Image (spheres, helix red, strand yellow):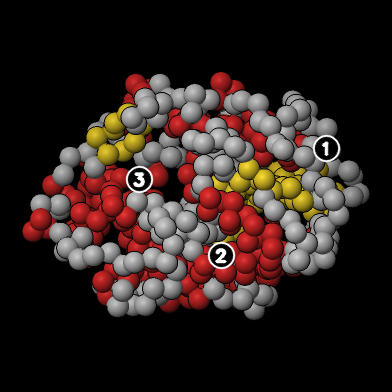
Amino acid sequence: MASRRLSAVAGILLATFLAAPASAAGDLVLDKAVVLMRHGVRPPTSSKAIAPFAAKPWPAWEVADGMLTPHGAEAVGRLGAWEGRMLASRGLLNAPECPKPGEVFAWASSQLQRTVDTGNALLAAMFPDCGLTVGHGDAKGADPLFTASDTDVGRLDPEKGRAAILAAMGGSFDGPKQRLAPLYQELSGILGCGAKGCDFADRPWEIAPKSDGRNLSLEGPIGEASTIAQVFLLEYANGLPPDQLAWGQIKSADDVIRLSAMRQIKYEYFERVPYIARRGASNILNQLLIGLAEGASVPGVDTAGGPPDARLTLFVGSDTQIAEIGGMLDAHWTLQSYLEDETPPSGGLVFERLLDKATGQRFVRVKFLTPRLDQIRSAAALDDANPPEYVTVGLPGCEGKGPDGACPIDTFAKIVTTAIDPTAVAPQTYR
């Protein structure tokens, strides 16, 4: 606990510095931001699926499965207000004044109403009474921009996928099982399900094709425990009282974060595995790159078919795409209030395009922005004295090439285009 408190103080100082005008960091100014954020707090996506794992009924939620909660929308709004002020302080926009036409563009996954609602809540807080809304496609099923591997765009070769997952695991399930065993024991005790034959340590693991044959999933305890750990985090973030949070058996944010390791380990062996990640997120990463390159004449980047050229481009999806991009780029973010590389509700990647006015050279700096877990739980107002976390993301190949983790935009583009699987990219229409 002491080290986390010290880290939180360091995080406040860091975030305050990062929110300062760009002139304080070299001579770079922010001239564009492209963001991929996760939706806000939601209930379980399937209450029916997790019901058998607990001896007692799960807590009731005020909205249907998978929808953005009112509390989640309020917390997103707090983040949006802070983000608007931060971008204004750095000269990118004039929030809370309404942006000029074309200065802001926002797009959400068509598959999930919670992503649309999250984007609208963020924009309403950044630019109050300006009437900005999030666009989205009209796909009825999986959205090829955000979940390409659930569509023909990013369809997996099941044998390649299975081999890649097993290679990441060291050749078998044995290593991950050993890592997860203590957490499974704790989880089974919380759920009270051991007597019902659902002890996680005793159940089989499997890498199985999804029903449509396009994608794979990790079946058994590694997937189920990941889901349940995330539900506990969402219960805490939504402000459930202590006696309802995991039936009174989780006492603090530290307990929630410790159990979240079950989700992070699952992501390590699936979403962040390079082959899996490239099939799933090449399409969205390509659009992020185009958004950054527009108006900058970046060699090797064709900007046709990208989003409108806006000063702020916002994509709203899920933690899956964020984790996959981390896996594609071997990129990592160290957070004070979460585990490394965690993708909390309303957290996300911010790609800053920076201009050196003296030389005309452009750079890209990647950051991760997220409210702290207790800030989400209380829907706390965010300001210089109580900022969210805003940390630089380590990007291999960019070390030492620019100030404060910035990467020359040409170098950044080469890294990204090398990581993208061009066979998992498709034309995108925005309207």
Of the image marks 1 and 3, the number of the one nearer the N terminus:
3
At label 2, the amino acid type is Ala
Callout 1: few (<14), some (14-19), or many (20+) C-alpha neighbours within 10 Å? some
Q: Quadrant of the N terminus?
A: bottom left
Q: What residue would you read off at disc 2?
A: 73
Residue at 53 percent across and 25 percent down: it is 153
Q: Is residue 163 found left or right of 381 in the rendered image?
A: left
Mark 3 vs 2, N-terminal side: 2
Between marks 1 and 2, how big is the CA–CA gap?
Answer: 35 Å
Mark 3 sits on what residue?
266
Foreground mark, 3 or 2, reads: 2
Q: State the image coordinates of residue 251 (x, y, percent, origin top left).
A: 32, 75
- Residue 149 vs 369, above or below: the answer is above
Kindly indicate the quadrant of the structure image that contains residue 87.
bottom right
Write down the residue under mark 1.
296
Q: Say which residue appears at 67% left-offset and 39% top-offset.
A: 288
Q: Nearer the viewer, residue 83 or 340?
A: 83
Identified by mark 1, the residue type is: Ala
Circles 1, 3 touching at the beta carbon (< 8 Å): no
